[in-house]
Image (cartoon, rainbow, N blue to C red):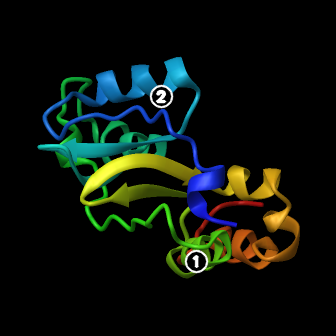
């Protein structure tokens, strides 16, 4: 199954100069936890609700802080013609839950782990992906 068959085609985005408040409001409106960041129609980054919380709010930055100061610039993308199993493996390898789908340099959709689950790739091929995505990237001092 190809990524284009299961991706979400209507993708909401922000620009690097948009405020984190605008990004957060858009995430609330469309009920999502991350947004691709477009600069001149090119995906240059992704900003997540966690980025806003950890890199802005926790550091005392205000709502007018630009997205570019908190976004994650190492963006991983996938082609709409790629196989969904390949996408699941990429998500696991990079510990991400969503992949912007790019064709000829343009954003054409987004693929979430939930999209894989809807077509039962989650249970078979990407069960390992979710497990690896959920692994902590470092030890935390959290109380359990």
Pick whichever, 16 or 64, lies toward us: 16
Circle 2 sits in a helix, a strand or a loop, which is it? helix
> Is residue 119 shown above or below 9?
below
Residue at 57% across, 42% down? 8
Residue 27 circle label: 2
**Can residue 122 be seen in the rendering of this structure?**
yes
Question: Picture coordinates of residue 57 (x, y %)?
Answer: 35, 36
Q: Distance between the residues labelled 2 and 1?
A: 28 Å
Residue at (54, 77) in percent of width and height:
90
Residue 53, disc: none
- Judging from the image, what secondary structure is the residue with disc 1 in? loop
- The residue drawn where x is 50% and y is 76% is 94
Which mark is nearer the camera, 2 or 1? 2
Total marks shown come to 2
Left or right for 119, reference 43? right
Q: Earlier in the sequence, mark 2 or mark 1?
A: 2
- What residue appears at the point 59 percent right and 49 percent down from the top-left corner? 7
Q: Position of residue 82 (x, y in %)?
A: 53, 72
Q: Which of 137 and 105 is in front in this view?
A: 105
Q: Looking at this view, is 123 or 68 the one in front?
A: 123
Q: Name the residue under label 1.
A: 139
Give the quarter of the figure containing the N terminus.
Answer: bottom right
Q: In this view, does 4 lie above or below 108?
A: below
Left or right: 114 with respect to 2?
A: right
């Amino acid at each position: 199954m190809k990524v284009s068959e299961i991706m979400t085609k209507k993708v909401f985005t922000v620009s690097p100069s948009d405020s984190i408040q605008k990004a957060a409001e858009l995430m609330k409106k469309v009920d999502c936890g991350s947004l691709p960041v477009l600069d001149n129609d090119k995906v240059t980054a992704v900003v997540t609700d966690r980025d806003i919380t950890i890199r802005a709010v926790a550091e005392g930055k205000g709502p007018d802080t630009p997205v570019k100061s908190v976004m994650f610039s190492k963006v991983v993308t996938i082609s709409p013609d790629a196989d969904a199993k390949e996408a699941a493996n990429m998500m696991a390898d990079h510990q991400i839950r969503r992949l912007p789908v790019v064709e000829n340099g343009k954003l054409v959709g987004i693929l979430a782990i939930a999209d894989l689950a809807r077509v039962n790739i989650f249970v078979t091929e990407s069960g390992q992906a979710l497990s690896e995505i959920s692994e902590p990237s470092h030890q935390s001092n959290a109380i359990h």
